[in-house]
Image (spheres, rainbow, N blue to C red):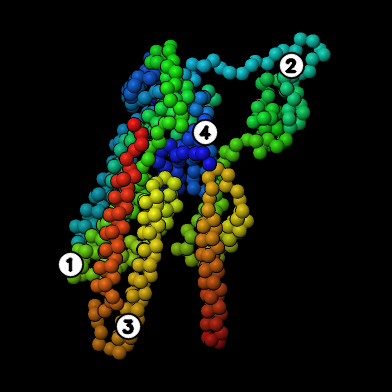
Amino acid sequence: MNRRLLLPRESGLFRYAELWLDGAEILYVNSSRFSERYSRFQIADIQALVVTEFALWNPLRSASLGLSFFFTLLLLILAPGAWAWWAVVPGIWLVFALFDVARGPRCRLVLHTAVSTVTIEAARTMKQANQAVPVLRALITSVQGELSRDGMTITPPIRSAGDVPVVKNTPLLQRVLFGMLVAHAGILAALFFAKQMENGLGLSFTLLAAEIVMGVIAFNRRREVGIWVAALSMVTAILATVDAGVLGFSMTKSWIEFFRAVDRGGVRPENIEWLWLREQTVARAIWHAVVGLSGWVAWLINKEPDAE
Amino acid sequence: MGYVVCGGCAMQVRTANWNAGGAIPCPVCERGVEVVVFPAAMRPVAGNPPEAIVTGEEASCYNHAANRAAAACDGCGRFLCTLCDIPVSNLRVCPSCFETGKGGVLEQVRLTERTNFDTIALALVTLPMPLCWLIIFTTPAALYFAIKHWNDPSPLFPRGKWRQWLTVAIAILQVILIVSLVVFIVRMQGGNR
């Protein structure tokens, strides 16, 4: 298979789009995850690329960010004792809204041939378009040559399509995953030094479940990233599965012991003794820190674009 | 090439603003528009216009009686003018054979769409899990999709079988769960009597 991914995959929950260089053609994949549509464009037939920039702030985005911020703040003030429970929903909304803003201004990239006009969903932000246009331009001019501004003269191609660089990047999922591992390690370390390790068990259980799912999905996207990022994603999924098993076993056993003690009488709910609490907190914090930081190092090595 | 339009307001971009080396504000919506035009845009329109029949002895196109036939369809054998002649790889076919895939045309035409039944099966077996009762219906459907499309080819991007294996494994667990629940309920009712 002589095919190269030209740009990092642009993906959402129920869609993704990719641009591939496939011989003398550009292969555009637009997927809803349940089905994929393929469009092929001969490089020699592409007539124009049009990028239209859209403003970052529109009423919907402003309202989303404002409301999520307002409700998170409101719940933090109204329920300071139970903030971790009540503020979590608007908090997640706020994170998504901030992430949406951090992606920067949006754009529409349209590709023209003599018989078709296609919106390329693989570049939906100006950041992506600024990566996509130079790569596509270099690719197309390597086949067709360059057209002067007045449209009167054509400079012949100076290099072959095979020499055109591709943009290498680590997709967001891996960055979020490794960031989450480091954050998880930090929370565990803070709880360890505050001698409140039992408060981290529920959070760890939720985060481990998320790490398993994200690790598997991140490994499944291995063709977009370097070998080390893919391998570390898989290591994360395996370690998180083992860790979740240990945590599940220890919590179950602790609860069984607790109920037996309650049956015998004289034990208060806050007196539950968690099995291997100190050991598993330390081990969990260490592997999260090591794998998370290694992931970031692998990403930093991998993120250098090949493009000129 | 005819024209290009602003992606925001569909206003035509003046040719003077093509290949400007950056974004130019659209005069109507004021959004930045960058137009990069390539030499292919300056090529004359390809294709030969159909020739009219001069004498009565000439073969005419099946679809256009006034046009001279230029080729025969490899699917159905009908005569075709240059308007109706569609080159597909090493074949020449008429529009109806192209549409129906007659004469091995479909094998020649590049794949344009694919349904990921493995993803559908996995979604069917996992997404309804929070609504417990729904798995009675979705588990058999997921198993059906996973098994029926087990050997579906994936010509463009090879897809592993892990989704199908995972679907089958989860579906078996769900079937065991459903059967256990039914047995448990039946026994409880038996015990109550």
Residue drawn at x 49%, y 43% as measured from the top left? A31
* Amino acid type, mark 4: Gly
Judged from this view, the residue extending furthest toward the right is B57
Query: Dot 3: few (<14), some (14–19), or many (≥20) neighbours within 10 Å?
Result: some
Real-space Cα distance between discs 4 and 1? 58 Å
Q: Is residue A179 visible?
A: yes
Q: Which mark is residue A257?
A: 3
Residue B184: percent from left, percent from top: 53, 79
Circle nearer the N terminus (3, 1)? 1
Residue A65: percent from left, percent from top: 28, 45
Is B60 placed left or right of B39 in the picture?
Answer: right
Residue at numbered disc 1:
A193
* Amino acid type, mark 1: Phe
Q: Which mark is residue B68?
A: 2
Q: Are marks 2 and 3 in contact (CB under 8 Å)?
A: no
Residue drawn at x 51%, y 64% as measured from the top left? B170
Q: Are marks 2 and 4 on the same chain?
A: no
Q: Are marks 3 and 1 on the same chain?
A: yes
Is A292 placed left or right of B98 in the picture?
Answer: left
Real-space Cα distance between discs 3 and 1? 26 Å
Instruction: Please tell me which residue lies in front, A7 or A126.
Output: A7
